[in-house]
Amino acid sequence: MNATTIDKTEAEAPIRSRHSIQERAPGALRHLATRWESLLALLLLAVFVAGGVTLPHFLDPYNLLDGTANFSEKALIALPMALLIICREIDISVAGTLALSSVAMGLAHQAGAPAETLLPVAVGAGLACGWLNGFLVTRFMLPSIVVTIGTIALYRGLASVALGDQAFTGYPQLMADWGQGTFFGVVPRSFAILLGFAALFAIVLHATAPGRRLYAIGNNPDAARFSGIAVDRYRLGLFMLTGAMAGLAAFLLTGRIGSTRPNIATGWELEIITMVILGGVSIAGGVGTIGGVLLAVLTMGAVTYGLAMANVPGIYMTIVVGVLLVATIALSRLLRGKPRSH
Amino acid sequence: MTFLRQREAVLALMVVALVLLVGARAPVFLGVGSLANLLTDSTLLVMLALAQMLVIVTRGIDLSAAAMLALSGMVAAMLAASNPGLPLALVMLAATATGLVLGLVNGWLIGMLSLPPIVVTLGTMSVYRGLVFVLSGGAWVSAHQMPAGFVAFPLERLFGLPHLVWIAVAVVAAMAFLARHTRFGRDLYAIGNAPHCAAYIGIPSARRLLWTYGLSGAVAGLCGYLWVARYAVAYTEIAYGFELTVIAACVIGGVSIAGGIGSVAGAVLGALFLTVIGNALPVLQVSPFWQSALTGAVILVAVIANGAGNRKRSRQILPLHQTDPSPLRNRA
């Protein structure tokens, strides 16, 4: 027996004892998970190669970094959304929360609040919206999709009541600095913030006990509760986290476009959920990684950027994303065969 | 008192009370013309909510309804604009058939491949909406390009009521029959209540789902023509975001998102309720900006009221067998 054969057998069957309990089923699921992210990475690479070959300025680093602006704010909300979907919950109301947070900042600014307080105002408003979602879901045991379909109408409605047919403009320079500015003259601040939060979320989800508990809740909420996990507290916390991140996104987006209008971030909720699902997070809960979500975000961003550069209308992008979404899950289902459960 | 325990009866009383309340503040709201308008305005939402109800009853959801409506509407508008001589019945058939095909694509993916409905319809929603743009090249089809008969049909009157209302009445009757008196309809409830048991007793779930989503598409297609003709314009963003309003109407009508529960009367009343709110605000001279916020509040109140029965059940650790059949009914 030489060294290479040992390595090979260990790689194929890491646990030899028949008494050991594995974290999850060997083979299929794990195989698929690694496959999904590698598939996405390949797709991202293909987009870059195709773009680099066909478009002269596609690979220009300044252009590329500038192009991150079109997805950074959405991706910031996609991170907590991934955690929610892993927990078998969903938040449709994020775009409404974002609109209401932006309006809260506009009102605070009008009332003469100093520029430094606007970020806490936005995050606070988001937190409050998230708390209401989480409270309704946990206290009344309601399905989160229904609650958040109700609250998106409520939040967006309140935002448009406050705005009427007006728009808040004239935000302080500080917000423009964060929304449009760069670090070291090249890296957009919103993109840097996104990378920082992605790292933080990845560590929490994949390397801490609370992160593992989220998977436990997603796999079987009742079993998780019986094993001593405060399931409702986690749910409430995640909704509040999602609200707070939507508030942060509102700060950056409002800073970038310099105004609050009633149609701010229309339709973002479904784009964000698409990002998360394309990233390999299962809508049935319990499966998904932050790395996958980030890869999906970057792939979608690169395609949007490439199409914009080729002067293709943005709506073609929605077709591409829709086909990608359906094709990826259909493909994985066909490869895996028919599932037993619904 | 058992009468009042029925969700639909309470909802019907609430709709009537709301109409009377608004009428007390602004008597013009109770005029025949105003009420006829209310009925006409509610028709599209009523039809879409009914189709959506059947989908939700199977534990599914159809987020692509509004996109299918937009695509079929565009097909109808472009067909009529380029062939003004085409009989109207053929145009309507084309719109319905377009919707049916789009719906069957959803149904095939969801039924035959067992993919999660929310993901499939989220994806096809983007695709269908994008196809409207591809088909029209981003251009509008406006009133002067459409034949006069095409635009006039929905609001033309028959026995004093617009065609729209008659079509909606026919759809409501057909759906009520389908849901209560056909094997197809009863199977949908079985699938929604217990998918595994439905499979064990021999219900062909995949085929049922295929045609349920197909039906949802066909209704959306018909509504696509009606929408485009009623508002006399077709463009990429028509009915944008309307899918959430349709689902909201179902939720208010007591259709459980967890499947297996829902009635035609509930969905119709939910749609009427939302339309009354929408039409009452201008009459009461309340800023129309309040509509969305009020709708949201109503949805929340409705789900909390509908969910009140669940609370006891979720604390119950072991299922009660034979002794009490009520937990089955209360699951939501």
Image (cartoon, grey):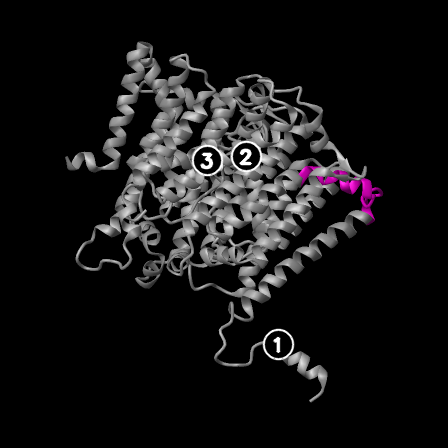
Task: Tell me the element at label 3.
Answer: helix
Residue at 28% in and 50% down = B313
The alpha-carbon separation of the residues under discs 3 and 1 comes to: 48 Å
The alpha-carbon separation of the residues under discs 2 and 1 comes to: 45 Å
The magenta-colored residue range is: A53-71
Task: Let me know if residue A209 is in the magenta part.
Answer: no
Residue at 45% in and 16% down = B287
Left or right of A268 on screen, residue A133: left
Comparing A76 with B227, the one in front is A76
For label 1, the residue is A12
For label 2, the residue is A95
Amino acid type, callout 2: Ala
Return the chain for callout 1: A
- Which quarter shows the N terminus of chain A? bottom right
**Residue B13 image position (x, y, % from top left):** 24, 27
Comparing A172 with B111, the one in front is A172
- Which quarter shows the C terminus of chain A? bottom left
**Residue B150 image position (x, y, % from top left):** 49, 24
**Residue A13 image position (x, y, % from top left):** 59, 77
Amino acid type, callout 1: Glu
Mark 3 vs 2: CB contact within 8 A: no
- Residue B244 is tagged as 3
